[in-house]
Image (cartoon, rainbow, N blue to C red):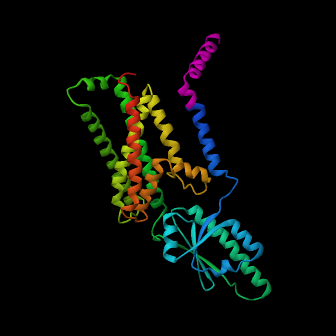
Amino acid sequence: MSAFGALAVAILKGFWRDKASVFFALVFPLMFLVLFGAIFNDTDASKSDLVLIDDVAFVEELEGEARDAFDDQFETRELSREEALEEVRKGDADAALEQSGDELVVHFTGTDQTAAARTTSVLGAFVDAANTAVLTTQAGADPPYALVTEQVEDDSLQMIDYVTPGLLGWAIAMSAAFGAAATLQGWRQSKLLRRLQLAPMPTRTIVGARVVVTLAIALVQTAVFLGLGTAFFGLTLAGNWWMAVPLVVCGTLCFMAMGLLAGAVTKSVEGAVNMANFLVLPMAFLSGSFFPLDEAPGWLRSISLAMPLRHLNDAMMDVMIRGEGAAAVLWPVVIMLGFALVLTAVAAKLFRWET
């Protein structure tokens, strides 16, 4: 038992002295506790963004406490029908409300089922209250208002259509970052990197070959992803889905640069992979790869806008599902290429041929 105790203490001391092990065993999981706590335990529920199409008499006729309650639940503005539906389709509004006679129509987007369900449920409560008020004074009368819902996208679209862009973005980021980080450290530890430096070929040839291979893997990965989704899961792509190709290329370059940075500042393959994981995995949650961020606090959504994966996911959603044109990819491409240039420059500055 004394030998067992001495060995256990030695292992514990070794673990405690390895700062990377301590970080990924204790601190890294706590980051996700804070992240999910901030997303799902927001005590100050934000208002739903509701666009009113032209004049909605039902809303204008609300008075007193009913009007105050409505204003507490919704942030409203008036737009034309075409502008309102476009706002909802792009995700800039939770829903649009239109009135035709006594029928209230809620237009929602399938890209965020949670916000749509919440908005429709709250509006339904106001409609029920208005109907009850009338029926209590006019016995036997029919309910004056009816609430119906309409999806702004094609009704044939399924949940797989909305989750695919985010999952594909995460897969591309993970593959590029992990591959670059592990390759750089693996080559350095095996001394292959030094041999390549001494080989009769310029450095740009080595870098170019690695970049081309990474891009080829990403494009094949995308083709397999979309092919399987279309063939077996009913994935429906918009007419401009092919514009996702430049996004995949630029996203791969961006996250490959992130992996190079991880490989440049760490001293082992495990450390490089762990750092790449530390950079990519939280970013995936904060960028909407796995679930929408509409329920997250405003400050957290603002932070996500500083992350390249958020722009990659949003742009792929625009061209693959929403049918947006070339303008939807220009700004995300600029952002990702900017990240790629900056991270590559920092990685080159910190890079050493030997560990």
State the image quarter where residue 326 is shown.
Answer: bottom left
Image location of residue 247, percent across then percent down: 37, 53
In the rendered image of this protein, does residue 11 appear above or below residue 62?
A: above
Image location of residue 301, percent across then percent down: 56, 52
Residue 176: tell me if it is visible. no
Which of the pair 30/325 is nearer the observer? 325
Toward the top, the furthest residue is 2
In the rendered image of this protein, does residue 167 appear above or below residue 234?
A: above
Q: Which residues are magenta?
A: 1-23
State the image quarter where residue 108 is shown.
Answer: bottom right
Can residue 6 be found in the magenta stretch? Answer: yes
Image location of residue 292, percent across then percent down: 54, 56
The quarter in which the N terminus is drawn is top right
Seen at 48% across and 56% down, the residue is 163
Image location of residue 93, percent across then percent down: 55, 66
Seen at 36% across and 31% down, the residue is 184
Seen at 44% across and 59% down, the residue is 317
Can residue 256 be found in the magenta stretch? Answer: no
Main SS of residues in magenta: helix
Which of the pair 141/247 is nearer the observer? 247
